[in-house]
Structures are given as C-alpha cells and as structure tokens.
Image (tube, rainbow, N blue to C red):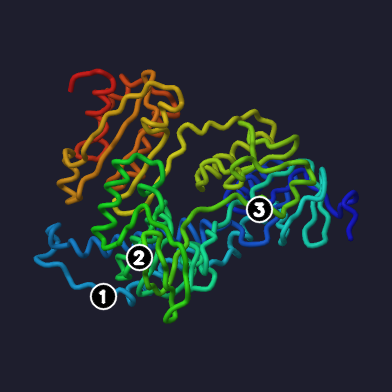
C-alpha cells in the first residue's frame, strides 16, 4: 500500500467531487495561480448537466409545448387545436432533444475544457487518509487545502418489496429512453411534481403520492394548493396524506399497497423522495470530522469545515440547489485565493419548473414568526394583472412577507414565476426598504406589475 505520509504528488488544493461546485472551485483557484487536482469517479460537471436539472428542464419544455398546442384555438392561433401525435412517439422525440442538450451524458468536452485551465483531473474515488493526504485507487495525493464537494445521492425509502419491482430514481428516469404507460411517483417535492407533469402530458397514467398534507413541503400553502390544482388538471392523480406500504412484482410491473388501504397496479415506480449529502466512505473520520445532525457537513460562513478543509454544494445540506453550489464555490474559491468572503443564505431562491412555475425565496409568515419576527403578508391575484389576459394564462398568486420595514420572503405561482421572482430575491438580499420597492415602476403589461399593490400595502401607501 502507498505510504500516506509520502504522497506521489502534492497540490495546493485538492477538490473531492467534480460536480458544479467542485468544478467551479477548481477552475477558479487554478486561474488564481494555485496548483489544483480535481478527483472524480463519475462525470465532470456532476449530475445536473447530464441526468438531473438540465435534461429535466428540457423535458418540461417539450411537455409545455404540447400543452400550448392543446390550447392553440383558445389563444387564437387556429380555429381549432390540431390533433397531437401519439404520446409515446412524441416522448421519443422529446428524449432525443433531451439527450442532445445533455451531451448524450458524455463529459469529454467538459474534461477538455477543464484540463485546459491547468486543473489536473484524477479519475477515481477519493478517500481521505489523514491530514494533508488522500488516496485514489491506491495512488496517494497530498494537499494543503481540501474542498469536499461530493454532492448528494437519491434516498430510496425502506419500503417492503420496492427493490423487487421496476423502479427509477429521477437520475435513472432522465437517462431512460422509454415512456411507461403508467407511473407511480413517490414524493410530492419539486422533482416529483415536475416528473409527474412531464409524463402526464405525454399520455402516461400518473399517480403521485405524498405522505404530507401538501405538495412542496413547507412552501406557502396557498401556492401549493394552486400547483395541486394544476397537476390534477393535467390528469395527475395526486394523493396527499398517503404513502406506499408494500410492493410486489405483478404483470411485469408493480402492485403497490397504499397506507389508505387501496392498491395500485403500475408499469413503473419513480422514486422522488429526496436526496442526502454524500459523506460516507470518503474518510472524513481521518480528519476527525463527522456530519451534522441532518447528514451534511457543517461549515461556517466562510464555507470552512475545519482548518484547511472546506465544503461546497449538496454535501453541506444547505439549500441543495445547483445555484447554491455555485454560490458556495465562489465563496470557497475567494477564500482559498486570500480574500475574506462570507456566505449569506437569506435570499437563496427555490423554484419548481412546472407549468405554471412555482418560485419562492426567504421566509413565509410562519417561518418568520418562528424566527422571532413580527411579519405581515400581502397577496396579489395574478388574474388582476393585464399580462394574464393577453397571455391567456390561468393566473396565479404572489405572496409577499415583510418585517422590520423590509421584505423577508416571497412566494409565487404563475407563468415564468422563476424569472420574475428575482426582484424579490434582490430586495431581500440587499434589504431594500419597502418604500423604495413600492416606488419601482414596472413595464406594462408584465407579470412584474403584480408586485405593486402588495408592496404599497406593506409600505402603508395608498394605490
């Protein structure tokens, strides 16, 4: 075995994991003149470009296009809506587009670009062997600073028989070519809702079960209810307060026994019950580091876990989104290059890319009260915005929460809500006074106008 005290090669910085966060840290620090090795057993770029965020959004866009065609006559684009191609055939077309956008899950272009920046890519699974050393497939590597960016992996619930029936994690579903005729989605979070809508719009019979009282966990309840209505309108059979108790193989698919006493026969099961930080098996114990209460690495506001050890991305368990990973990567890279940068998580946006989209940032009223604030909320119905009529959309909702003279939270559902909620994100991050926000002029007609009445109400101004 290689002697861990005498590494074969040493670097200023070694990054464990080449996902979004790890790749960003490595290239930025290398550009700053430090020697960098990036250790990765899978693809450079992680899951997001190949089997997660990007391909899922591509499929959602294809599904949305089918929805638009169905409503073509209502939008005045034709005297009658054209008949759509068979869902299974159309799904194949969407998959081909998805795979083109996802580079057919081939990271060779990303590898070439990475190595062009001077980063040394080490293929293999890295395990920390002690302070300043780690091992990759028997090769010992030395480091001065270590960045743990190992990401997360799908949580598979311990349901009896689940391992014996045809099932997908979301990553597997977004690599698969076939469209099942029937699908059971376990979990009503963002991914579960998105995948359910995609398959329903391509003609799959979809049942979504969520053990909780609403979709999207603790997001704004009124927004969650509108998403529930939208999914049901698409034909998704959403069952709240229900969970799968047992599975058994049946007819080439799965027979599921539910907690409400019902049974369900489906061709395939989609597991969308969340993800957990990937901390096991990487040798953290060699540094005396243990995951926190929720399984992620506990880092300070400099994204530092311990002396010379940093963490970024899903492995921290902090707002596990690609944009959070990129933000943390910027913080880590700046600190490794001698700056003094700290992270602020008050305004990390959350988005669900269904049609209509759901977006939120900051705290809702209940969370604000739990934080010791005295919040006030104001609501806007998007049916009152002119753009809703011109676009022929079903409307939506904007909920704003304020405390101490500033905005502390916002939640919305409506066309492109993920885009126009950026105004609230900036306002929360910059602590813009309500009076200033209420004085902002929005172009007419846009969905951004929805901010004006609730902000005037919160600022105590007359319309």
Count up the numbered dots: 3
Q: Could you say which disc has been placed on residue 85 in the image? A: 1
Instruction: Point out the image quarter for the C terminus.
Output: top left
Number of other residues with Cα within 10 Å of mark 3, as a class: few under 14, some 14 to 19, many 20 or more: many
Residue 348 versus residue 106 in the image, above or below: above
| Closer mark to the observer between disc 2 and disc 1 | 2
Q: Residue at x 40, y 41 (%)?
A: 218
Q: Position of residue 366 (x, y in %)?
A: 38, 31
Q: CA distance from mark 2 to mark 1?
A: 33 Å
Chain-order first, disc 2 or disc 1: 1
- 384 or 261, which lies in front? 261
Disc 1 secondary structure class: loop
Q: Which mark is residue 152?
A: none
Residue where numbered disc 2 is placed: 262
Dot 2: element: loop
Whether tag 2 and tag 1 are in contact, CB under 8 A, the answer is no
Q: CA distance from mark 3 to mark 2?
A: 43 Å
Question: Mark 3 vs mark 2: which is more N-terminal?
Answer: 3
Image position, residue 58 (x, y; %): 40, 61
Left or right: residue 134 compared with residue 421? right
In which quadrant of the rendered view does residue 106 lie? bottom right
The structure residue drawn at horizontal position 17% and vertical position 51%, both measured from the top left corner, is 392
The residue shown at (90%, 51%) is 6
SS class, disc 3: loop
Disc 3 from disc 1: Cα separation: 42 Å
Please say if the residues under marks 3 and 2 sit with CB atoms less than 8 Å apart. Answer: no
Q: Residue furthest front?
A: 261
Residue 49 drawn at (x, y percent): 51, 58
Q: Residues within 10 Å of mark 1 (few under 14, many from 20)?
A: few
- Residue bearing mark 3: 17
Q: Earlier in the sequence, mark 3 or mark 1?
A: 3
């Amino acid at each position: 075995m290689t002697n861990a005290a005498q590494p074969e090669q040493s670097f200023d910085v070694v990054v464990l994991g080449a996902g979004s966060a790890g790749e960003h840290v490595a290239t930025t620090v290398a550009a700053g003149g430090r020697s960098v090795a990036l250790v990765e057993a899978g693809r450079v770029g992680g899951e997001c470009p190949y089997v997660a965020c990007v391909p899922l959004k591509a499929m959602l866009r294809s599904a949305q296009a089918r929805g638009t065609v169905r409503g073509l006559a209502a939008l005045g684009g034709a005297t009658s809506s054209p008949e759509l191609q068979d869902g299974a055939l159309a799904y194949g077309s969407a998959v081909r587009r998805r795979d083109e956008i996802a580079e057919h899950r081939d990271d060779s272009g990303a590898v070439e670009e990475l190595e062009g920046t001077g980063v040394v890519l080490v293929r293999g699974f890295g395990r920390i062997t002690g302070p300043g050393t780690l091992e990759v497939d028997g090769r010992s590597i030395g480091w001065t600073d270590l960045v743990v960016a190992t990401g997360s992996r799908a949580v598979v619930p311990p349901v009896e028989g689940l391992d014996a029936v045809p099932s997908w994690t979301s990553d597997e579903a977004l690599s698969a070519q076939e469209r099942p005729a029937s699908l059971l989605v376990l979990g009503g979070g963002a991914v579960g809702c998105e995948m359910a809508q995609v398959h329903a719009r391509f003609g799959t019979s979809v049942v979504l079960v969520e053990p909780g009282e609403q979709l999207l966990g603790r997001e704004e309840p009124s927004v969650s209810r509108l998403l529930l209505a939208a999914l049901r309108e698409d034909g998704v059979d959403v069952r709240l307060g229900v969970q799968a108790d047992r599975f058994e193989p049946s007819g080439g698919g799965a027979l599921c026994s539910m907690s409400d006493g019902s049974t369900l026969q489906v061709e395939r099961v989609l597991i969308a019950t969340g993800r957990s930080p990937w901390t096991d098996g990487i040798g953290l114990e060699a540094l005396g580091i243990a995951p926190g209460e929720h399984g992620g690495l506990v880092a300070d506001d400099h994204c530092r876990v311990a002396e010379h050890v940093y963490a970024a991305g899903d492995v921290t368990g902090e707002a596990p989104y690609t944009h959070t990973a990129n933000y943390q990567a910027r913080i880590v890279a700046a600190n490794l290059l001698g700056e003094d940068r700290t992270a602020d998580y008050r305004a990390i946006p959350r988005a669900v890319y269904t049609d209509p989209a759901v977006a939120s940032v900051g705290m809702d009223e209940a969370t604000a009260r739990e934080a010791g604030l005295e919040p006030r909320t104001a609501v806007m119905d998007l049916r009152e915005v002119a753009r809703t009529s011109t676009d022929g959309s079903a409307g939506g909702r904007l909920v704003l929460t304020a405390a101490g003279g500033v905005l502390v939270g916002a939640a919305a559902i409506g066309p492109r809500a993920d885009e126009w909620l950026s105004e609230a994100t900036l306002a929360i991050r910059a602590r813009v006074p309500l009076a200033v926000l209420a004085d902002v002029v929005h172009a007419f007609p846009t969905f951004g106008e929805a901010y004006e009445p609730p902000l005037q109400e919160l600022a105590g101004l007359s319309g």
